[in-house]
Image (cartoon, rainbow, N blue to C red):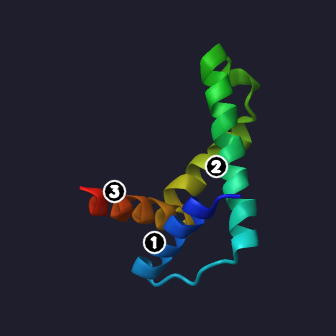
């Protein structure tokens, strides 16, 4: 489960005025991004990026730049960090 990440996502949705997805849908989407990040870390550790699906990697990079889901999580993270300062 990702309760902290979902909470950050909800903060970002609130700030942007996005409609929130359910926690179950969030978990599916978050797991997808997390799996991609783990694959990148493994490829970086072995310096073997050729093993990654280049089409999938390009798709995920584009999604990370444009996806409202990602923007909402990042804004939630930024707001939480500001409140700690």
Frontmost of labels 1 and 2 is 1
Image coords of residue 26 (percent x, y): 68, 67
Q: Is residue 33 left or right of residue 68?
A: right
Q: Position of residue 9 (x, y in %)?
A: 53, 68
Q: Position of residue 79 (x, y in %)?
A: 35, 65
* SS state under label 3: helix
Q: Which residue is mark 3?
A: 81
Name the foreground residue: 77 vs 72: 77
Calculate the distance from the C-alpha at mark 1 to the C-alpha at mark 2: 20 Å
Q: Is residue 25 above or below residue 66?
A: below
Judge left or right: residue 56 versus residue 10. Answer: right
CA–CA distance in space, label 2 to label 3: 25 Å
**Exactly how many numbered labels are in the figure?**
3
Q: CA distance from mark 1 to mark 3?
A: 13 Å
When the figure is inspected, residue 13 is found, relative to residue 83, above or below; the finding is below
**Residue that carries the numbered disc 1 in the rendered image:** 12
Which of marks 3 and 2 precedes in the sequence? 2
Query: What SS does tag 2 mark?
Result: helix
Mark 1 lies on a secondary structure that is helix
Instruction: Tell me if label 2 and label 3 are in contact, CB under 8 Å.
Output: no
Quadrant occupied by the N terminus? bottom right
Residue shown at 29%/57% (left/top)?
84
Which callout, 1 or 3, points at the residue further toward the start of the chain? 1
Q: Which residue is mark 2?
A: 60
Mark 3 neighbour density, 10 Å: few (under 14) some (14–19) many (20 or more)? few
């Amino acid at each position: 489960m990702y309760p902290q990440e979902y909470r950050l996502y909800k903060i970002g949705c609130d700030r942007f005025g996005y409609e929130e997805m359910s926690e179950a849908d969030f978990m599916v989407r978050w797991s997808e991004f997390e799996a991609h990040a783990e694959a990148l870390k493994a490829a970086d550790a072995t310096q073997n990026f050729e093993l990654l699906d280049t089409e999938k990697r390009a798709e995920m990079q584009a999604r990370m730049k444009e996806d409202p889901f990602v923007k909402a999580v990042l804004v939630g993270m930024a707001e939480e960090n500001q409140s700690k300062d």
